[in-house]
Image (cartoon, grey):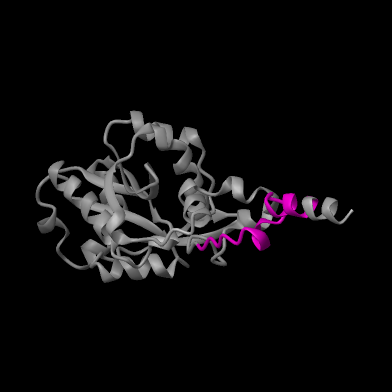
Amino acid sequence: YIVYFYYINMIYLNTDRDPLNQVKIPIQSDGYVGGIPTFIKKNPNNYMKMLSSAHKIIYQSHHNPNIDEVFFAKINQSYIDELVLLHREWFPTFYDKEHFKKYFVKKGSILIGAFVKLYGNNYLIGCCIGEIVNEDKFRENVVNVLYERGFFNSFFSKKGECFYIHSFGIIDEYRKKGICTKLFNKVIAEMKVRKCIGIYMHVIEYNKSAISFLEKNKWMNAGIRKHYYCLDGKFFDAKTF
């Protein structure tokens, strides 16, 4: 009897029945109001299935993240599943496969990723996704602050396209290592090649980490979009940068 019950207990420790206490894979995200993704609370029994492959391999292998192993490349369609999982970790709004498929077929879309090569496989740990938009769309989002500062017409004297960043993120184990800055620089370099005259993005008001990062990297605060986000029936403002 002793051997029998011990065996059952070992099976329990290797299942998802108690993932938060047994597997102990912490996920932090500034995109959620409380800092911990809602899906952890709502789906504790499916927690491991909802994690990105990068998080699983890092914790299961006890890998120590190293900035030197990170490389950047355009994301191909084989990473759609990973994009869904990573965005679920980062943002309270769920994006399915169909949401990401359009970026692979829509002209003007840009998908640049941060990857690490572990045990012979490339794992997606961060990404920047967006699309080129016309100048009118850009003006619609930033015109007020630029006019107030008195240099809108002179700065944008030439007509051109702009780039709107839909989403940007990196898993927490690789944050605060300069990787986000390098990823942004890759995006900006791509925009210069395409001769874009501006880049803008929205950040939910309570994401202090993202706001601090943008301000530190000299992004201009272009004002507030009132009630831009609606999450679980609650409205939140967005800051435009």
Quadrant in which the C terminus is drawn: bottom left
The residue positioned farthest toward the top in the image shown: 105
Residue at coordinates 73% horizontally, 53% vertically from top-left?
Answer: 10
Q: State the image coordinates of residue 64 (x, y, percent, origin top left).
A: 41, 62
Q: Is residue 17 magenta?
A: yes
Residue at coordinates 35% horizontally, 68% vertically from top-left?
Answer: 176
Foreground residue among 107 and 128: 128
Q: State the image coordinates of residue 4 (x, y, percent, origin top left).
A: 84, 50
Question: Visible in this render: residue 140?
Answer: yes
Q: Is residue 87 magenta?
A: no
Foreground residue among 103 and 67: 67
Foreground residue among 79 and 119: 119
Question: Visible in this render: residue 238?
Answer: no
Q: State the image coordinates of residue 189 (x, y, percent, origin top left).
A: 17, 50
The residue positioned farthest toward the right in the image shown: 1
Q: In the displayed structure, does residue 174 sit left or right of residue 152?
A: right
Q: In the displayed structure, does residue 101 sit left or right of residue 46?
A: left
Which region shows up in magenta? 8-28
Q: State the image coordinates of residue 150 (x, y, percent, origin top left).
A: 16, 66
Work out whether 222 lies above or below 195: below
Work out whether 12 lies above or below 194: below
Residue at coordinates 27% horizontally, 54% vertically from top-left?
Answer: 183
Q: In the displayed structure, does residue 75 sit left or right of residue 53?
A: left
Q: In the displayed structure, does residue 131 sit left or right of residue 48?
A: left
